[in-house]
Amino acid sequence: MKQFFKFLFASTLGVFLAIVLVLFMGIGIAAISVTAIESQKSITLTESSILHIKLDYPINDRTSNDPLENLDWGTMKSQKSLGLNSIIENINKAKGDDNIDGIYLDLSFISAGYATIGEIRDALHSFSDETGKFIFCYSEMMSQKAYYLASVSDKIYLNPEGYIQLTGLAANLSFFKGTLEKLDIEPQVIRHGKFKSAVEPFINDKMSPENKTQIETFLNGIWDHVRDEISTGRGLSTRELNLITDSLWADNANGAMENYIADELHYKDELLADIRELIELEEDEEIPFISLTKYDRVPKTRDKDKKKTVVRDRIAVIYAQGAIVSGNGGKDEIGSERISRAIRKARLNDKVKAIVLRVNSGGGSALASDVIWREMRLAREVKPVVASMGDVAASGGYYIACGADTILASKSTITGSIGVLGILFNMQGFYNNKLGITFDGVKTNPYADLGNLSRPLTDAEKRIIQKEIERIYDVFITHVAEGRGLTKEQVDSIGQGRVWAGGDAKDLGLVDVIGGLERAIEIAQEMAGLEEYRLLELPKQKDPLEELLAEIMGEGQEVLLKHQLGDVYSYMQELQKVSKLQGIQAVLPYEINIQ
């Protein structure tokens, strides 16, 4: 009877999992079908159309074709979200589109870093300056990031009962020392660099003085840039804006109006009336808004006077976003094999005349970073190579970029962190005291069980690992010195694991030009001497069905967890990253949450 229930339970579980699998696949195929149908629908623009931009989703560097990533689990409908590349491309496309009269920014909260938002803001600024077309923004409430973007607008409309969060920047770090102590787990840390603070969350319950110094420095650097751009956009002095920020005068609609943070206090119907009047529509006529995702399907307007020619030359844009790991890596990781293969493919392709590596990474495996750096170095020997830094390109992220001819960053980019560390968790107390598990064994050689989590490291083992840390650090600063035209001593003085804002990094020689991805492509074009070119985006993305199969084979659970855990998911991700650490790491010190 016991065996009967055992087999019954196993069969029931198998049937249940099969049903879940079929359901998951069905949802995915439905999402693919809906996306395919939508993409084939022709979009016809009417005259005096308004491009409606609502950035209410996480903004990655590149638009994904993953059908489940774009699935709204509440409505079970595919909600395509555009990456930074497509957002900027569509804003630029709208410049030359005679059917687009202006842009309506519909903003509340933006899930992106200040560097990413800054690149979108630059594109909007160019749209307004070069065309004279209007940009209006409306919101019931705006986060500081949203307001930073909105400050490029001709007019900012705020709901009469709304508010704007203008408070300055704060960085919050999570510390796990107390948790580890409760579990009797000892973090064994070996590092080079007094600022290399990636391990601090595991050994401290607050920031070290060195860590606090570097965070204050780069946070002030980012705020200075954001504040200056908002001040210029709103016609205020930086002193006035600081006073408004320090006094929280924009935390209600009247205060925002009185202090020139907003232009008009309007309800939505009043805003729409203003737009109708501007584009000369009758009161009962519908405003021809077109969303950014729909506009993505509108073909670019061709220059009628320009002859149609076949453009052979290409600039390869290689996207490297996420933690750096060995092998192919996952969808949100920089796999050394996958990215190296993409760089190699671009190097060996005669049609590719220049390469742009777009980096958005806090680092990861030092070995994997070196593998990618080698391919960057080989590519640089035969064609121009430009590195474009996004929100963060630090530690391993800087390692893979330092081999480029030219490096670009935003003033809000977090970079540097030139340092190396290793961390091994001694789980002996946890196993013994919490679980009652003990271990014993034999070995043929002294270091046969080096890295065993069930015991602490010996002094000899610590010396061995420290020696390797020092060697890898020396290799790191050597690569940076050669790539940047600096001495190793100069790199060491600004290294030591210290993190810098992009503006400071340029002053120190770690960055050449302040600018985003668009400017990086322009520089690559100039270096290659190209008049016309096409972009080749790498690594090549899987087609939607391949993505779906990958989700079913394991990655799908991550999509579900993101949906179920919401904001808590980021904490779980951090713990997952720690559990995946292998070998010596060149990684950004901690996960920085800038508000």
Image (tube, rainbow, N blue to C red):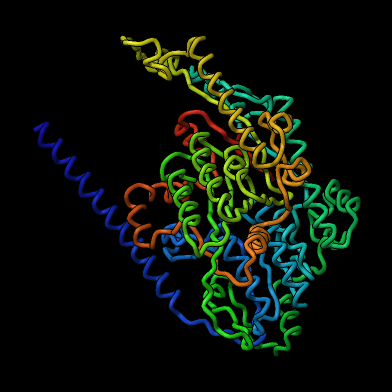
Q: Is residue 307 above or below residue 436?
A: below
User: In the visual, does 159 lie left or right of 97?
Assistant: right
**Residue 410 in picture, x, y percent from top left:** 71, 52
Residue drawn at 44 percent across, 64 percent down: 75
Question: Going by the image, does 517 lie left or right of 572?
Answer: right
Q: Report the side of 587 relative to 262 (left or right).
A: left
The answer to whether one can see residue 108 in this image is no
Tell me which corner region of the image, top left, top right, bottom left or bottom right, holds residue 142: bottom right
Residue 550 is left or right of residue 54, and the answer is left
The x and y percentages for residue 478 are: 63, 33
Q: Can residue 296 be seen from the camera position used here?
A: yes
Q: How many discs appear?
A: 0
Residue at x-position 41% and y-position 42%:
327
x and y percentages locating residue 375 in the rendered image: 51, 46
Query: In the figure, 572 relative to 191: above or below?
Result: below
Q: Which quadrant is the N terminus positioned in?
A: top left
